[in-house]
Image (cartoon, rainbow, N blue to C red):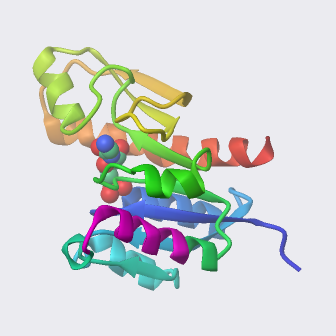
């Protein structure tokens, strides 16, 4: 019988972090199984990625729910049915609210493309570059009622003095794809 922890990944877009975590689990570098993917954009690339890896997906149009509470209730039911231990937000562009926090609080983590608490919220990388930042980075933190304000679990920084936003996104993603699986492994061991 498997005693591996069960992970759900929430994403809204490309899903390169979904891919990095899922492959790390498949290869045994992370001692867990990705058993669920939640997506608020049914046409997003991450939905195809999940299908290719055989990960059960709950992809929905938020407008199809009468309220955010009912939407989060449906998400929490989907997680409950799959006995999810840990929720990893990976480019999920919605704020998690009380309904989901009351059922999964303390078990939801997020990756953010800045050295928090700097550049919380949307367009963090673009805003950091516009600001003239020279040390960029990535943060993994617990999710609470605040936006990108929960307790920090891990950070990794690197210098960048160029002005090519695509190159910078590539560097950020490369760091994320290492740091997220490593951090999940560390958390699951604790
Ligand atoms: C990642 O860079 C992640 O840090 C960011 O979205 C990207 C998703 O990429 N998240 C946020 O900005 C959250 N505020 P991916 O879909 O290729 O994993």
35 vs 187, left or right, is left
Magenta-drawn stretch contains 69: yes
Report x, y in % for residue 63.
Answer: 19, 73
Q: Nearer the viewer, residue 99 or 92?
A: 99
- Is residue 27 something that shows in the picture? no
Judge whether 79 appears above or below 48 on screen: above
Q: Quadrant of the C terminus?
A: top right
Q: Nearer the viewer, residue 162 or 189?
A: 189
Name the residue: 69% across, 57% down.
29
- Is residue 161 something that shows in the picture? yes
Q: Which residues are magenta?
A: 66-78
Q: Quadrant of the N terminus?
A: bottom right
Magenta-drawn stretch contains 96: no
Name the residue: 41% across, 53% down.
90
Q: Nearer the viewer, residue 128 or 39?
A: 39
Q: Is most of the magenta stretch helix, strand or loop?
A: helix
């Amino acid at each position: 019988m498997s005693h591996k922890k069960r992970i759900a990944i929430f994403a809204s877009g490309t899903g390169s972090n979904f891919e990095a975590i899922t492959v790390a689990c498949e290869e045994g570098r992370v001692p867990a199984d990705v058993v669920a993917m939640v997506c608020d954009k049914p046409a997003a690339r991450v939905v195809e990625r999940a299908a290719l890896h055989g990960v059960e997906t709950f992809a929905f149009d938020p407008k199809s729910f009468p309220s955010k509470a009912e939407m989060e209730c449906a998400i929490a039911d989907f997680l409950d049915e799959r006995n999810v231990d840990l929720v990893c937000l990976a480019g999920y562009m919605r704020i998690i609210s009380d309904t989901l926090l009351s059922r999964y609080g303390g078990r939801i983590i997020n990756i953010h493309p800045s050295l928090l608490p700097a550049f919380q919220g949307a367009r963090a990388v673009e805003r950091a570059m516009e600001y003239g930042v020279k040390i960029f980075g990535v943060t993994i933190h617990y999710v609470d009622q605040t936006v990108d304000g929960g307790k920090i679990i891990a950070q990794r920084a690197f210098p960048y003095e160029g002005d090519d936003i695509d190159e910078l996104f590539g560097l950020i993603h490369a760091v994320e794809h290492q740091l997220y699986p490593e951090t999940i492994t560390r958390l699951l061991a604790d």
